[in-house]
Amino acid sequence: MLKKFNKYFFIFISVFLMLFMSTAPSFAKEVNNLYIYRGRDANTVSNLINQHIIKKKYYTYKADVNQGFFYFQPKYMGIYSDGDFMIISVEKTESNDTLVFIRCNDGSIVMQNILLKFLEKNNCRKEISKDKDLIDKFSVKVTEKLAIKPQNISTEEVKTTIPDTQNNNQPTTTNKIPVAAQNITNKLSSEVSVVSTKEKNKTPSISPKLTNKNITEPKSSDFREISKAGVIFNNLNRGIVIVYSSVGHGSGFLVDKSGLVLTNYHVVREQGDDLKVRFGKGEVLQAKVVSIDPVNDVAVIWVNLDKIQNYTVLPLFNPPSSEPLVYVGESVIAIGSPLNWEDYEKTLTQGVVGKFENGVIMHDASVNHGNSGGPLVNFGGYVVGINSFVPSNEDNNGLSGAIAINRAFPTFDKAFFAIQSMNKPSPEILPDIPSVSYSYEIMKNEYSKNRFNGNADINKRGAPYVINSWNYDIFLVTPTQAYRKLAQEEDETLAKHKKRLDKAGRTVSPEEYTSKTLAEIGYKKPLVEVMIMPKPQMTPGSMVLGVLDFTVGILAATSGGPYYPTRSTYQYEYKKDFDKLVLSNNTKNITCKHINSGKAPITNDILEYYKSQNIEMKDKSYIGVYEFDPKDFYNIDEMNFQIYSMDGKPPKFIKIPQDFKNYIVEDFMPYWKYIENLNKNSNNGI
C-alpha cells in the first residue's frame, strides 16, 4: 500500500531518516585483476578465501580449495543480485610468492574489495600486478577451467567448499536464476575458441599445481532447480513497474502496448503530475492518471513507451463461464516492490488462495506496503488480481487481499477509449535515483574524523536546515543529519558508562560505539530533500480575542486583581495551499531539475502537535516534498526557491542562505569522495 506520510510531525522535534542501495548487476563490464602476495603460502591464501566465502554465505558454483579455484555469487546487504559473479584463481610462483587472479563484473567490485581487506587483516599484503601478459594468461586458464564440464563430488567435499543448499540462509529457487550462472559460463567458454594456439602454448612463469584427482565438481543441475513460479516471474518482470512520487510508492503492471498500467487508486490518489513509473534502472517515465475507480480501488495510468527498449504486456485472465476466476487452494504468486523499493524492487512471493468472495481474493503470498497495485498471477502466467491490502488485524495469519481482475475491466476499457483523444505523455527518460547509497559506514567514518580533527561543530548539525517565511517554512534535509542525531544520542548514552569504565581502567568496546551503524539498513538516497510546510496563522477572530486577552491581562496585573483569559485555545488556519516548487540559480539564469516530487496531506499527528501548543486546527492542507541533486547547491551563486500556491498568484521568491548551501556541500563531501575513489579503483582495475 502507499506508505502513509505521517512522519512529518517529527519535522519539529526530530530528523527524517532516508532510505539504501543496491547497485544493479551488469554483464556489460568484466574486470580482471592480478594481485601479488609476497612470501605468502598459496594454500594459506586459498583457505582464507574459502573461509571468507563460507562466512559471507555466498553461493558457490565451483570451488576447489586445494587447487585454489573459486567461482561463486556474492551478495550485497543479504540479497543475491542476479548477474553478479566472482572467479578467483590462486597459484604459487617459482619465487614462493602467491598470485591471486580475480575476475568479476563491475557490480561485484565492492564485494571484491571486502575480500581483499579480509586478506589484509590476516597478514596478506597485496601488490597490484600490471603485467598484461601474465593477466592474459590467467584469464585464459580461468576460462578453460570454467569450460571444463564438472564431474560428481562427494557430500563431504561439498560441505567444506560449498555452502549447504538446504541451509535457510541460502537463496531459494525463486530469488536466484540458474540461467545467469550458465550464461557467464557459456560466454567465458566461447572465449576459449578465440584464443590462438600460439598463445596457449606459451610457457607460463607460474609453476603448475599438482592435481588432486580425488576432488571432483558437481553439475549445477544436480542440486539446483528453478520453480515454475520463478519461470513465470522471469517471463513477466519486464512488465511490472514501480509507481511512485517522493512521498510514497506502490506497484503496477503493464496491460497494453499503448502504455496503460494498472495499479490501485490509493497508490496514485492526490499525486497529480508528480507521479512516475520505473521499469528498471535508468528507465523512469512521467505518468498520467487517465481513469479511476475509488470504490474498487483501481486506477489506470498512462506512460509513453517510445524509449523503453524491452517491456512485457501482462495477460489478464478471463476464464471460461464454467470456471471461477480462482479456486480455493490454487497456487498464486505476487510480484511487487515492498517496503523500501530501492532494496526490494520486483520481489516474488508465492502462496495459495484461501478464499474468493465478493470480488476479493484472500491469499497467503506475502504482501507488504509497496506491493499495492502489483499483480496476483496464477500458474498459467495470467493476472487474476491486483494486490491491494493487508488486514490491519495483527492476527491475520499472513493473509493478504487482492481485487479480482475482472473488477478492473470497466476502468481499463474506460481508459483505453479515453487515451484515443488525449495527448501522449512525454517519452523523456527522467532522472533516476543514484545507484550508490550514502551508506551509514561513510557517515560513521566522517563523524569519527570530525570528533578528532577540530570539526566537532559539524557533528552538532543533527536537524534540518530551516528557512522561515510568512506563509511557508522550508526544511532542507540531508542523509547525514539523521545519523548525527543518532550518534550524538548514543554518545550521550555512553558518556557516564565510559567515565566509570575509565576509572576502573577498562574501555568501552568498539561494538558499543559501532552499533549505531545497524540502526537502519537500507538504501540512503544521496539527495537533498526539500520539504515545504504551509504555516498556520491565527484567524482574524482569534487575533481580536488575543489582543483582548493581552489587554485584560495587563490591566489586571497593574491593578493587582485576578486575571481570567477569555479563551484557552486560539483558532488557526492556513493562508496558502502549496502547489509546486522551483529551484532556480539566478546568477546563471537556470532552473535546477528535481529528481523527485510529491505532495502529502498534513496528518493528524501534526494537528495533535498544534493542539498541544494551545492551537486549535480544523483545516486541511498539503506538504510539498522535492528531491534535488546536492551538486545543484555547490556554488556561490544567488539561488532562490520559487513557491507557487494554489491561488494562482505569482510565486514567492525565497533566497537560500549561502551558509545552508555550504552545510549541504559539507554534508555530501564524504559521499563524493567515496564515489571518486570507487571510480578511480574501477578505472585502475581494482
Image: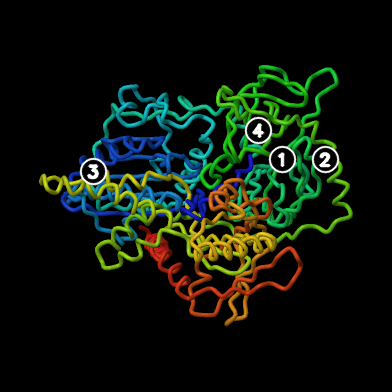
**Identity of the amino acid at label 3?**
Val
Mark 1 or mark 3, whichever is nearer to me? 1
Task: Say whether residue 585 is left or right of residue 196.
Answer: right
Q: Mark 4 sits on what residue?
A: 389
Q: CA distance from mark 1 to mark 2?
A: 11 Å
Q: CA distance from mark 1 to mark 4?
A: 10 Å
Name the quadrant of the C terminus: bottom left
Which callout, 1 or 3, points at the residue further toward the start of the chain?
3
Residue 411: mark: 2
**Identity of the amino acid at label 2?**
Thr
Residue 264: mark: 1
Q: Nearer the viewer, residue 386 or 348?
A: 386
Q: Mark 3 sits on what residue?
A: 45
**Identity of the amino acid at label 1?**
Asn
Asked if marks 4 and 2 touch (Cβ < 8 Å), the reply is: no
Q: Residue at x 74, y 52 (%)?
A: 303
**Identity of the amino acid at label 4?**
Phe
Which callout, 3 or 2, points at the residue further toward the start of the chain?
3
Task: Say whether residue 56 is left or right of residue 372.
Answer: left
Q: Based on the displayed image, in which of its 4 quarters is residue 163 positioned?
A: top left
251 over 570 or under it: above or below:
above
Q: How far across and how far down the image is residue 628, in percent?
A: 56, 64
